[in-house]
Amino acid sequence: MFDEKAVMAYFRTTEDERAAKRLAGQASPAFLKEILFELADRCEGGWIVSRAAMRADAVSDAVWPIIRSKHPATYLYLCARLRRGTSEADALELVMTCPNSIMNQTRGLAIWAVGQMGMIRVLDEIVARGEELHRRDLEEFQCFSV
């Protein structure tokens, strides 16, 4: 039997992402609503946060800024999936902050979310800034190859 409170206590002690993954997939929607702030703040995996948010009864207003700051691609994904509005300027800023490195390829998800929200001008601006993104990607790649 799955004990969501025991798993959360374990996560609080260890920050073991396997526990967060179990919570995101198996905890009750009401419990997820209660712990989502903590998961968003302490989880490295944005996909775990998005799964928990999608299954939660609701995402409170206090949780959104945490998701936005720690998991920008997840934030845009959730905005698209949950039909939460965001401005085109905000969406572009978030896409531009998302990495596309070997260890963290979240920019593609952010671009997908922008497209799902119908932000064509943002997509055009991303294309126009392609050289800038390419340069950043190469710089980040060089950090891994040293």
Image (cartoon, rainbow, N blue to C red):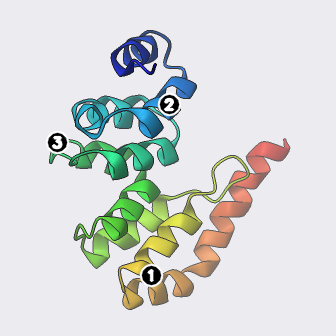
Q: Label 1, secondary structure: give it.
A: helix
Q: Are marks 2 and 1 in contact (CB under 8 Å)?
A: no
| Circle 2: residue type | Arg
In three-dimensional space, the C-alpha distance between marks 2 and 3, rounded to whole angstroms, equals: 23 Å
Dot 2 or dot 3: first in sequence order is 2
Q: Quickly name the residue at label 2.
A: 22
Q: Residue at x 63, y 50 (%)?
A: 104
Dot 2 or dot 1: first in sequence order is 2
Q: Image check: 46 left or right of 94?
A: right
Q: Quickly name the residue at label 1.
A: 115
| Circle 1: residue type | Gly
Q: Residue at x 44, y 21 (%)?
A: 2
Viewer-proximal residue among 142 and 49: 49
Image quadrant in which you'd find residue 26: top left
Percent position (x, y) of residue 102?
Answer: 73, 51
Q: Quickly name the residue at label 3.
A: 62
User: Alpha-carbon neighbours of circle 1 within 10 Å: few (<14), some, or many (≥20)?
Assistant: some
Dot 1 or dot 3: first in sequence order is 3
Quarter of the image with the C terminus in it: top right
Q: Residue at x 63, y 56 (%)?
A: 105
| Circle 3: residue type | Ala
Q: Residue at x 54, y 27 (%)?
A: 17
**Residue 67 higher or lower than 117, as above or below:** above
